[in-house]
Image (spheres, rainbow, N blue to C red):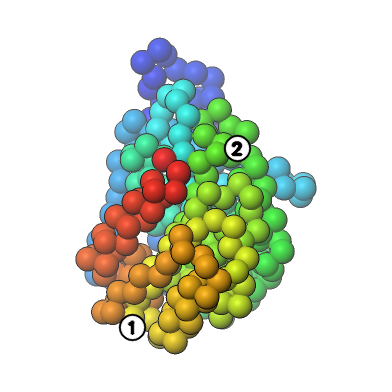
Amino acid sequence: MHNLTRPDGTEPEDLLLSRRAVTSMFFAGYAVTALSAEAAPIVTPADGLTGEEVHISNGTPTGLPAFVARPTGKSRHATIVVVNEIFGIHDYIKDICRRLARLGYAAVAPDFFYRSGVNLPALSDMAEIRAIVAQAGEAQVDGDLRAATAWIAAQRFSKPKAIGVTGFCWGGLVTWRAAMTNPDVRAGVAWYGQLKTVIPRAGELKAPVLGLYGGKDKGIPAEDVRAMGAALDATGKTGSSIHLYPGAEHGFHADYRPSYDAAAAADGWARMLAFFKSNGVA
């Protein structure tokens, strides 16, 4: 629900948001293929927040779609880019944005898979999902993220020098790369992102990254986590670090999935906020 009430009256853009809400660009609900029947996902109230769906100029005819949540008003805020899992933009990712907005951040979740024209969270076939995700190559995704941070820096709601990135699963890997290649990024927090391709690139980090990983993650071996920690040490990237939750599985923050671990998720969230604050994303 969008909050369309301002102390000084309704603005024209508020009415535009209400029309957008009727024809949302994004899936309503949780990713079908990963949703647990027993899940009780966190639902963050939207009162006091402004939510909108935008298109960000990225050199394509339609632009990059993105979901934005921020505190209502005219103040400037540190901004976090929220990078989704392989399931695209669905209610979990939108709620992450609202959680950050309630803490005083602006949050922007770009739809990196929009070129497929497929409503990705609605798919139930993992093979089909993976095929679509594979079409989003590294250069394309990193370029879209640079377009997103450039757009953020130009917005009246943002502090241009206080932009962070956090990403989950697929988005965790994107976060590591963003800290290597995107000059707008002040800090990143990667939740269980693949490491094999970025371990040899640890020395390229331009911004610090906190990696949050599960010890029972079947897709990211503990050896990779240890290797990334060693690579950070070897290249002198002392501002970056890895934290491992021994009993947690892959996707331990995703409160709509069977792998959700409430204790690890809460601790990781607290570490993320502290990391952003200590690195100027506040």
The picture quadrant where one finds residue 176 is bottom right
Could you tell me which quadrant the C terminus lies in?
A: top left
Q: Which residue is mark 2?
A: 153
The residue tagged with tag 1: helix, strand or loop? Answer: loop
Which amino acid is tagged 2? Ala
Residue drawn at point x = 54 percent, y = 24 percent: 13
The picture quadrant where one finds residue 131 is bottom right
The residue tagged with tag 2: helix, strand or loop? Answer: helix
For marks 2 and 1 on the same chain, the one whose residue lies earlier in the sequence? 2
Percent across and percent down for residue 180 are: 61, 61
The picture quadrant where one finds residue 113 is bottom right
* Left or right of residue 104, residue 180 in this image: right
Residue drawn at point x = 70 percent, y = 43 percent: 57
Percent across and percent down for residue 216 are: 33, 83
Picture disc at residue 69? none
Q: Is residue 120 visible?
A: no
Q: Which residue is mark 1?
A: 216
Classify 239 as above or below 18.
Answer: below
